[in-house]
Amino acid sequence: MSSSATHPADDERCPCGSGDTFGSCCGPILRGQRRAATAEALMRSRYTAFSTRDLEHALASWHPNSRPQRRDLAASLAETRWLRLDVRETTGGGPFDDEGTVEFVAIARTDQGRRELHELSHFSKVDGAWVYVRGEIAATRH
């Protein structure tokens, strides 16, 4: 975990919006206690990492070929306060798949105001672990 990350307590609601507690949802994934079983679980853990400013998990969950520079991602994490996640649709990405997509809308607040990110994220398995490969922006509203 990044020293600036502020995770919720295990008995608090998970920031990813699943309805589960942090300790039974994204917490164990962010702490490296278990792998995400599905592409959607990894995407939710990535949202939680972004919302709690967990730079280490955000970087580790990115495919090595598309991972941004640490300083660029750190700057992005510091500028945005993520407020809500709505998973719209998943394709593939199950425990027995090697690829999958997750469509989501995430709401954030920046210095410029409210931001809505609508993305179709692509995931693949590398050495048995789900990783984020790339995203296609469907719509971004400010």
Image: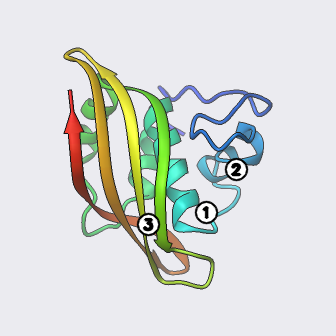
Q: Residues within 10 Å of mark 2 (few under 14, many from 20)?
A: some
The spot of residue 13 in percent (x, y) is 70, 31
**Residue with the mark numbered 2:** 28
The residue that disc 1 covers is 36
Which residue is at a point 76% across and 34% down the rendered structure image?
Answer: 10
Residue at the spot x=41%, y=50% of the render? 104
Please report contact status of discs 3 and 2: CB closer than 8 Å, yes or no: no
Q: Residues within 10 Å of mark 1 (few under 14, many from 20)?
A: many
Q: Residue 131, labelled with which disc?
A: 3
Cα separation between marks 3 and 1: 9 Å
- Residue 49, given in percent of the width and then of the height, sits at 49, 40
Q: Dot 3 lies on which element? A: strand
Few, some or many residues within 10 Å of mark 3 (<14, 14–19, 20+): many
Is 38 left or right of 86, judged from the image as shown? right
Left or right of residue 14: residue 119: left
Query: What is the quadrant of residue 122 in the picture?
Result: bottom left
Of the pair 121 and 78, the residue shown nearer to us: 121
Position of the C terminus, as image quadrant, is top left
Question: Can you tell which quarter of the image residue 126 is in?
Answer: bottom left
